[in-house]
Image (cartoon, helix red, strand yellow):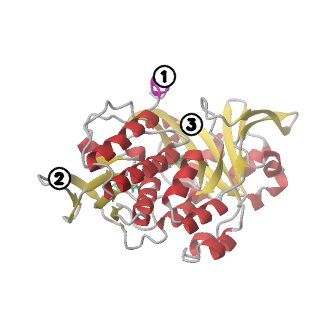
Amino acid sequence: MKVIVIGAGLGGLTLAQGLRWSGIDVVVYERDDAEGRAQGVSLHVDDRGAEALRACLPPAHAAMAEATMGGPRERTLTLSDVDGTLTVVGTQPATGVGNLPRPGRQAHRPLLRAVLLAGLADVVRFGTEFTRFEQRADGTVQVWFAGGGTDTADVLVGADGIGSAVRRQHLPHARVVDSGRRMLMGATALRTIADTGLPELIGHSPARVQVGGTMMALGVLRFTEPPVAARQRWLPALPLDAVATAEDYTMWALPITREQLGQAASPAARWRLAKELGGHLPAALRRVVTEAWPDLTVALRIGTIPPVPAWPAGPVTVIGDAIHLAPGFGGNLAMQDARRLCAALVEAYHGRLDLIDAIGAYEDTMRRDGFPAPAAAKAGT
Ligand SMILES: Cc1cc2nc3c(=O)[nH]c(=O)nc-3n(C[C@H](O)[C@H](O)[C@H](O)COP(=O)(O)OP(=O)(O)OC[C@H]3O[C@@H](n4cnc5c(N)ncnc54)[C@H](O)[C@@H]3O)c2cc1C
């Protein structure tokens, strides 16, 4: 069996690791070069993502990923400015209900990506943009790339994110709905804000601060094991530059609108906008923004894909943001899809399930868990 995966994001790489580890021939085509796009520094990994990493990655990779996450995040704190001092005024358990996260741990996203890529040098082809596919009479799928190259496999997986070209051809009726909401997100080295008292106040928990009309979210990552030592212990094959500069930090986020984001297209412009919007926040929070790494400031578009009615299963399928969007936990769903699809393909590979039935069974669970409940879908429009 040969599998072509389009997209070397969280879902595509988790799937590729799992297939490789199971002895299945897999090749990943990625449009970007090896450096990739800025996607922020932080990822809240909940039980779904953690289970996928354990199931799909070789044990040393999984241990490295786990060792370099932050501590357990079991509740969300609400902070407020009480008589000029930032104070915890409420806590809510991380139940996953409403807009509360599920319990989990914070991961350093570029480091996690490096772990997911480790050992896949001969599997991932960077700088190769998928353009279209064709299902052939013998049941295989042929794909074409910008520039004219082509490849053929038994299964094609679209793991190509929100703008998925695989989805556009395979499920042209699926729509991406832009909510108009955006999230400005950045990261700040803990050493630069140590004297504000914020890191101690928050601990490992995600925190929300409401001051006047402005909401700000914060999340401190203190590596459980220093990344350089963890690499030495678990995964010496990981490039040293993936860990050399990683240091404890806090992520921060400011919800804004599409109009507020305006033309702030570069990281530096987004950072300046964040400083402007947070200008009236208490001094400690202003410090978090002014001391941030400017080039790591990103803007997350909040959107949704309304549920797509079931389609006939075939050798072409989709995972992750290519088929469902979930602000705040889309990465976990992408990794969960990867785990489930990998398990289904392994069953087919060993002849225990028909290939198309296996893909259909994966798609049933993906649709069940990936699409928002009707009320949530409406709220996202
Ligand atoms: C700032 C920020 C913070 C976030 N925080 C969290 C969080 O804390 N927890 C969480 O669970 N989720 C979070 N998310 C969401 C999460 O990042 C996404 O849901 C997740 O990356 C989706 O994974 P994916 O593999 O489906 O797609 P992606 O990670 O988007 O990967 C898709 C890949 O496909 C490639 N591609 C696209 N088109 C083509 C083509 N035609 N040919 C070849 N390659 C192509 C892209 O270059 C990309 O590398 C966050 C997102 C952002 C931006």
Gap in angstroms between the C-alphas marked 3 and 1: 22 Å
Question: Badge 1 is on which residue?
Answer: 375
> What's the magenta bit mostly, secondary-structure-wise?
helix
Question: Badge 3 is on which residue?
Answer: 256
Would you say the residues marked 2 and 3 are in contact, meaning their CB atoms lie under 8 Å apart? no
Residue furthest right as drawn: 83
Nearest to N terminus: mark 2 or mark 1: 2
Name the one closer to the observer, 287 or 205: 205
Name the one closer to the observer, 246 or 223: 223
Q: Which of marks 2 and 3 is in front?
A: 2
x and y percent of residue 26 in the render? 34, 64
Nearest to N terminus: mark 2 or mark 3: 2
Tell me if mark 2 has few (under 14), some (14-19) or many (20+) residues whose alpha carbon lies within 10 angstroms of its own. Answer: few
The tag on residue 297 is none
- Tag 3 secondary structure: strand
- For the point 71% across and 42% down, which residue is it? 74
- For the point 66% across and 63% down, which residue is it? 67
The stretch of residues the image draws in magenta is 373-377
- Tag 1 secondary structure: helix
- Residue type at the position of mark 1: Ala
